[in-house]
Image: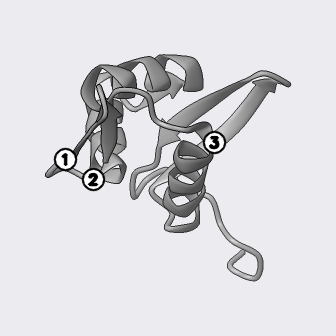
Amino acid sequence: MSRKLGIYVWFAKPIRLAILEILEKVGGRISESELKERLKKIYGEAPSTVINQILMQLEIDGLIHVDSINPRERIIERLSEEKRYLSVGED
């Protein structure tokens, strides 16, 4: 949901799917700032807390991996069947 000019607008596509589609378009790897810019074009201003929750859930589900490259920037990478991280006890 986005609020523009005092009007709430509902989107048919969840942000979760939009993130996965953006990753697919850019080859599977994108910086967090670039991802936020692309999401802003689609949804308007999305709170960082919402984006962080979705990224965390996607990482828990094993669909992406988020890595910090410095304290203010992160890289989001789409995982495939060939490349995935093992959870505790899976090794």
Q: Which mark is residue 88?
A: none
Judging by the rendered image, the residue that carries numbered circle 2 is: 14
Asked if disc 2 and disc 3 are in contact, CB closer than 8 Å, the reply is no
Asked if disc 2 and disc 1 are in contact, CB closer than 8 Å, the reply is yes
Q: Amino acid at mark 1?
A: Phe
Q: In front: 90, or 20?
A: 20
> In the image, is residue 58 above or below residue 48?
below
Judging from the image, what secondary structure is the residue with disc 2 in? loop
> In the image, is residue 90 above or below residue 54?
below
Judging by the rendered image, the residue that carries numbered circle 3 is: 66
In this rendering, position of residue 8 left or right of residue 58 = left
Q: Residue furthest bottom?
A: 89
In this rendering, position of residue 19 left or right of residue 57 = left
Please report whichever mark, 3 or 1, sits nearer to the chain's N-terminal start: 1
Judging by the rendered image, the residue that carries numbered circle 1 is: 11
Judging from the image, what secondary structure is the residue with disc 3 in? strand
Please tell me in which quadrant of the rendered image residue 63 appears.
Answer: bottom left
Q: Residue furthest left?
A: 12
Q: Say which residue appears at 20% left-offset and 49% top-offset.
A: 10
Within-10-Å neighbours for mark 3: few <14, some 14–19, many 20+: some
Q: Say which residue appears at 26% left-offset and 27% top-offset.
A: 42
Within-10-Å neighbours for mark 2: few <14, some 14–19, many 20+: few
Q: Amino acid at mark 2?
A: Pro
Residue 74, percent from left and from top = 68, 28
Within-10-Å neighbours for mark 1: few <14, some 14–19, many 20+: few
